Image (cartoon, rainbow, N blue to C red):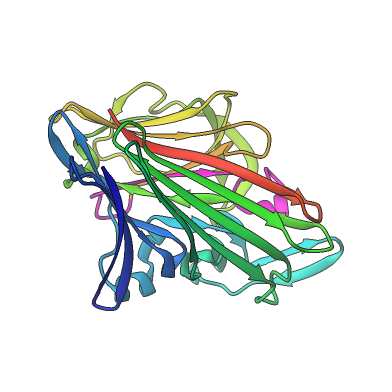
């Protein structure tokens, strides 16, 4: 029922996991951080493209709004691109020049290798791997990253990330993902529901101040309308955290679920870009600026590993 094929068009290579009976599929670009640039799921006999992704090499190179990017080795923003760890100071390149921050790590343009393909009647699975070997002076640590994409009609996408410290010293790390969801039109008429959590208040550089406030919007399913969203939440749940995007016209719901708990996805960012044609729902293991404020930052000992899990379903 499932097959995995490789396609190359206009210089862009994609790996496609497809259900040959339903035409549902998942498209992955190993060259750009294992980016998920397309996903089509079925509900009530109709196919729905639900990922707003890049289509060309130029778009991937520009990486506007970091659509569907893997966020490693830290998530969200790093203030002034600067941090200290174990008594040493490090500087990373600035890629958010208007706010003088380093944004979303640097794995969004990292090439992954195909490690394994698996197909059966129930699902198709692709595993990508890479070894980061201290290439950047601003992050002189060594770790391996493995991304597992399991795709099926029954469960949608299950994305599993495994990170192993390959150093002989401690390393600081955070992990996340930056998917953009769409039903093909503006999000204003969609309904949003977010997990229970508190909102992290920000300074003029969009860096958390350490102050928080209760999350009052979208705790229950609520129409988005013209609401502006670029909100970071610290989650308050020990169960799977669910974010729901409901399309009342089609009576279908996109669900992003994330495993929470010790060293798991305990943070969430929700963002609507200016064109309002999609909404980003970003599971994260740590808060913005975690290399400085240590909020959710994971410290791995030599040889130690973490495994994080999230997924997408259409209901």
| Foreground pick, 41 / 3 | 3
Residue 276 visible in the picture: yes
Q: Is residue 42 left or right of residue 143?
A: left
Is 131 in the magenta? no
| Foreground pick, 306 / 92 | 306
Q: Quadrant of the C terminus?
A: top left
Q: Is residue 121 left or right of residue 143?
A: left
As drawn, 105 above or below 267: below
The number of numbered discs placed on residues in the rendered structure image is 0
Q: Quadrant of residue 245?
A: top left
Q: Residue at x 69, y 69 (%)?
A: 139
Q: Residue at x 69, y 55 (%)?
A: 164
Q: Position of residue 261 (x, y in %)?
A: 63, 31
Q: Quadrant of the N terminus?
A: top left
Instruction: Name, please, the residue furthest toward the right.
Output: 87
Q: Quadrant of residue 193?
A: top left
Is 280 in the magenta? yes
Residue 231 visible in the picture: no
| Foreground pick, 15 / 222 | 15
Q: Position of residue 292 (x, y in %)?
A: 71, 55
Q: Position of residue 158 (x, y in %)?
A: 43, 40
- Over which residues does the magenta segment extend? 273-296
Q: Position of residue 90 (x, y in %)?
A: 74, 70
């Amino acid at each position: 029922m499932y097959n995995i094929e490789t396609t190359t068009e206009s210089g862009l290579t994609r790996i496609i996991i497809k259900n040959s009976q339903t035409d549902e599929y998942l498209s992955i670009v190993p060259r750009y951080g294992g980016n998920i640039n397309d996903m089509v799921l079925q509900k009530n006999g109709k196919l729905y493209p639900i990922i707003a992704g890049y289509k060309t090499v130029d778009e991937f190179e520009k990486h506007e709004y970091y659509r569907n990017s893997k966020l490693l080795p830290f998530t969200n923003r790093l203030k002034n691109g600067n941090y200290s760890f174990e008594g040493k100071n490090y500087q990373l390149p600035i890629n958010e020049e208007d706010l003088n921050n380093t944004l979303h790590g640097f794995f969004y343009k990292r090439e992954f290798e195909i490690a394994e393909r698996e197909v059966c009647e129930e699902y198709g699975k692709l595993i990508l791997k890479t070894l980061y070997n201290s290439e950047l002076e601003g992050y002189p640590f060594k770790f391996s990253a493995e991304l597992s994409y399991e795709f099926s009609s029954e469960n949608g996408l299950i994305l599993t990330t495994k990170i192993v410290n390959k150093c002989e010293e401690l390393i600081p790390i955070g992990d996340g993902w930056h998917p953009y969801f769409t039903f093909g039109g503006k999000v204003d008429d969609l309904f949003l529901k977010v997990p229970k959590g508190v909102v992290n208040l920000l300074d003029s550089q969009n860096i958390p101040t350490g102050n928080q406030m209760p999350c009052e919007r979208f705790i229950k399913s609520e129409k988005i309308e013209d609401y502006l969203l670029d909100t970071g939440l610290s989650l308050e749940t020990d169960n799977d955290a669910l974010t729901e995007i409901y399309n009342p016209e089609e009576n279908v719901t996109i669900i992003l679920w994330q495993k929470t708990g010790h060293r798991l996805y305990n943070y969430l960012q929700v963002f609507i870009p200016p064109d309002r044609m999609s909404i980003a729902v970003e599971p994260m293991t740590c808060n913005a600026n975690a290399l400085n404020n240590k909020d959710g930052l994971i410290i791995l000992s030599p040889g130690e590993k973490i495994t994080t899990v999230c997924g997408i379903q259409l209901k």
